[in-house]
Amino acid sequence: MEQLLQQIEACKNEVAAFKAHTPDDVEAFRIKYLGTKGLVKSIMGEMKNVPNEQKKAFGQILNQFKAFVEAAFAQLQANNEANSQNETANFDWSLPGDTTLVGTRHPLSIVRNQIVSIFKKLGFAVAEGPEIEDDWHNFGAMNLPEDHPARDMQDTFYINQNPAWLLRTHTSSVQARVMENQKPPIRVICPGRVYRNETISARAHCFFHQIEGLYIDENVSFADLKQTLYFFVQEMFGKDVKVRFRPSYFPFTEPSAEMDISCLICGGDGCNVCKHTGWVEILGSGMVHPKVLENFGIDSTKYTGFAFGMGVERICQLKYRVNDLRLYSQNDVRFLKQFTGAL
C-alpha cells in the first residue's frame, strides 16, 4: 500500500509540473495519463490487490487522484484554446496572402490550337508525321527533284546523305504521306515543328512551327482557296482586317500566291513591322501542282486541290505583338506568364 501511495504522489507531481505549448502536447498528456493504457488506469487496476478492509479508504484516494488528473487535463485544454484565440486575434488579416503561381499554355500552343480550331469548323482533320524524313517525302514528292534550284531556298539539316535522311524543312512532308495513304476527298491540316539551318536572330530560328493545309476533291478551285483563307483571317484577327493576294512561286503549287493582311500594329498606316507598306505577309498558298497529284496516283484530270502553309510564330507575333522569335524558346517566365488566362 505504501509503495502505491508513493506512486500516486509521484504521478501527481508529474501532472502538476506538465507544460503544454501545442495541441500535440495536450494530446500527449491525455494518452500518457488518461488513455486506455495510461498511468491512471494502471494505478486504479491495483485496487484488486488492496485488502478488503482498506478498499473503501483507498478507493477514495484513487477517485481523488483521477479527478486531479482530469482537472489538470481540462486546464491544459483551456489554456491551449485561449492561446490559439490570442494568436488569431493578433493576426494581421490585411497582410497579402501567399502568391500561387498559375500555369499556362505556351503562346505558340495557344495560337496553334486556335488555328486548328478554326479549320476544324470547315471540316479539316489534323494529320501528323515524323520530324525525321526521307528526301522523297520532303522534297521529291513535292515536285523538287535533286537538281531543282528551289532546294537552295531551304538550308537543310541532313542526318545521312546516302540514303538521304533529314530533319523536315516543312510539314508538306505530312501532306505527302496523307496523299500516299488516302484517296480523295482529302481535307487535312498538318501542324508541327520544322527545321532549317539558319542563323538564330530576332527574325529567324533554326526551328519553328508550321501549319499547312491540303484540300483535294473534284471541282476544287482557287475561289475555294480564297474563301477558306478569308474565313480563317476573319476568325483569327477580326472582321475589319483587309486581305490581298500576290502572285508568287512554289514548286508544289501552280498557280501560287502569297497572302497579306493589313498591318495590325499600325492599322495599315505604315510602321516598322510592315516596313511602312501597311501590309504583312502571313502565308503562302496555291493550287496543288498536277505532278504532285500524279506522284501519288491521284488522277489530275479528275481531281484538283489547294494547299497553304503558315508559320505559327508569325501569326503569334501579329496576335500578341511579339517582336523577337527567340523569346518563344528561351523559357523566360517573365515572358510566358503574360499569357496566363489566354485561350
Image: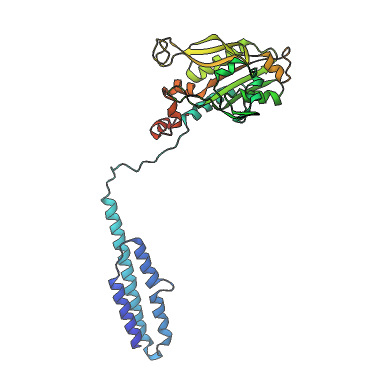
Write the residue at 37% across / 89% down.
Answer: 54
The residue furthest left is 90
How many callouts does the rendering have? 0
Provide residue 223's location: percent of width, then percent of height.
61, 10
Is residue 121 at least partly visible in the picture?
no
Question: Taking 235 as reference, is 63 above or below it?
Answer: below
Is residue 236 at least partly visible in the picture?
yes
Locate residue 192 relative to residue 314 in the image: left or right: right
Along the viewing direction, whichever of 22 and 71 lies nearer the viewer: 22
Along the viewing direction, whichever of 35 and 319 lies nearer the viewer: 319
Along the viewing direction, whichever of 320 and 63 lies nearer the viewer: 320
For the N terminus, give its image quadrant. Answer: bottom left
Locate residue 111 relative to residue 129 in the image: left or right: left
Q: In which quarter of the image is residue 9?
A: bottom left
Write the residue at 64% across / 19% down.
Answer: 146
Provide residue 304's location: percent of width, then percent of height.
68, 14
Q: In which quarter of the image is residue 229?
A: top right
